[in-house]
Amino acid sequence: MTRTTRRKLLKGAGAIAAVSALGMPPIRDAKAAKLGPRDATSRMNMGVALLQLGNDGRSEQAFLAALAINPALAAAHVNLAEIYRRREDWPRAAGHLNMALRIVPNQASYWASFAEALDHLDRLGPALAAYSRATQIAPGAWPVALAAGDMATRRGRLREAVRFYALALKAN
C-alpha cells in the first residue's frame, strides 16, 4: 500500500476505521476512550466502519456508546436498527427506528424501514400508515410504494395495495 493511499484512508475513513482497513491491530475501547471519551460522533463513525467490515457485535457496542453520550443521534439509532434487522430482532429494530423518527420525522427511508419492522411484528395498520407517510414525504420513491403494495397484497388488503401500486406506477 502506498503512502498516499494510507494517508487518504487515515484522513477519509477516520483513524480508527483506517487502522482496521490497513490490517493493523484493532484499537481497544480504552484507547478509543482516550481519543475522545465524550465524542458521540466519533463513536458512531467507528460503528459505521465496523458495520461495513461486517463486525456487527463491535459496531453495536459503538452505536450504543454513542447513544449513551448523545441519545439524539438519529443515524446511530438507524444503524442499530439495521443490525437488529439482520438478526431478525424486530422489536428492537422498530424501537430504534421509532426513536430515529422522533428525532428526524421527515426521513422517508426511516419510515419505510419502520414499516418493514412493523410488518414483521404483525402490526399491519401501523405498517401501512408508516408506508403512507414515507410515500407522502418522497412521492417519487417508487420502490417504497411498490414494497407497500406488496405488503398490503400479502396481507389481503387489496384496496391499499392498489393505491400503493398506483403511486409506484405514477412515480416510475
Image: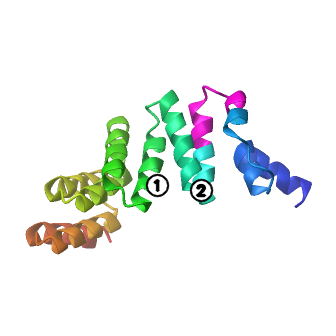
Judge by depth and name the residue closer to the eye, 126 or 159.
126
How far across and down, in percent of the image, does residue 112 sit? 32, 57
Left or right? Give the position of 153 relative to 61.
left
How far across and down, in percent of the image, does residue 50 sit? 62, 52
* Residues marked 1 and 2 touching at CB (< 8 Å): no
Label number found at residue 83: 1
In the image, farthest residue toward the top? 38
Three-letter residue code for mark 2: Asn
What secondary structure is the magenta-colored segment mainly?
A: helix
How far across and down, in percent of the image, does residue 75 sit? 47, 43
Among the 4 quarters of the image, the one containing residue 167: bottom left
Q: Can you say whether 132 is above or below 41 in the image? A: below
Residue located 46% across and 55% down the image? 83
Left or right? Give the position of 113 relative to 165.
right
Q: Can you say whether 35 is above or below 9 in the image? A: above
Left or right? Give the position of 157 relative to 18.
left
Label number found at residue 55: 2
Q: Is residue 138 visible?
A: no
How far across and down, in percent of the image, does residue 49 sit? 63, 51
Residue located 24% across and 65% down the image? 148
* SS state under label 2: loop
Judge by depth and name the residue closer to the eye, 148 or 69.
69
Q: Is residue 156 magenta?
A: no
* SS state under label 1: helix
Residue interval drawn in magenta: 33-45
Among the 4 quarters of the image, the one containing residue 53: bottom right
Three-letter residue code for mark 1: Ile
Instruction: Give the Cα distance between marks 1 and 2.
Output: 10 Å
Label number found at residue 114: none
On-image quarter of the N terminus: bottom right
Judge by depth and name the residue closer to the eye, 151 or 51.
51
